[in-house]
Amino acid sequence: MIATAESCTGGMIAAALTDIPGSSAVFDRGFVTYTNAAKQEMLGVRSGTLKAYGAVSEEVAREMVTGALQRAKGALAVSVTGIAGPGGSEHKPEGRVCFGIAKPGHTSTETIDFGALGRDKVRAAARDHALRLLLDALR
């Protein structure tokens, strides 16, 4: 069973999975946690982590994916948090997205800088990358 924890993609990963007929056999639930408060309340992301690293960080992606795995009836979870745009900063530019992937006993994170492609393209690229992470984890 798969669970998703999404911020900048706003449920796009869960939607892509549930577009497939019969997906209820493998998809348990999706958490859309767009705000920091939602990340804390729904996934257990710590306020100290948010303050120290910011919402767009591998540390937060790790806590998001861990929280999703713990709260779902899943054996696999993916998380996404990033800056789809417009905007960003020198330290966290538009197009930066942090991912987490977890199954019992193993969690990993990574950051991808997709660049300032525009909001729609960054979100689509993040969705597609998360789906690849899930596929790779299932192999």
Image (cartoon, rainbow, N blue to C red):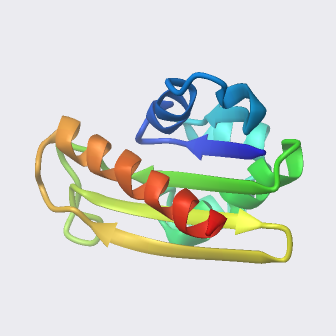
* Image quarter of residue 97: bottom left
Nearest the eye: 113 or 91: 113
**Residue at figure coordinates x 62%, y 76% from the top left:** 108
Position of residue 91 relative to residue 19, above or below, is: below
Q: Quadrant of the C terminus?
A: bottom right
Residue 112, image x, y percentages: 33, 69
Q: Is residue 30 left or right of residue 75?
A: left
Q: Quadrant of the N terminus?
A: top right
Nearest the eye: 96 or 72: 72
Q: Residue furthest left?
A: 117
Position of residue 48 relative to residue 78, above or below, is: below
Residue 57, image x, y percentages: 49, 67
**Residue at figure coordinates x 55%, y 36% from the top left:** 35
Position of residue 51 relative to residue 123, above or below, is: below
**Residue at figure coordinates x 21%, y 35% from the top left:** 120
* Image quarter of residue 92: bottom left
Say whether residue 10 is visible: no
Residue 132, image x, y percentages: 45, 59
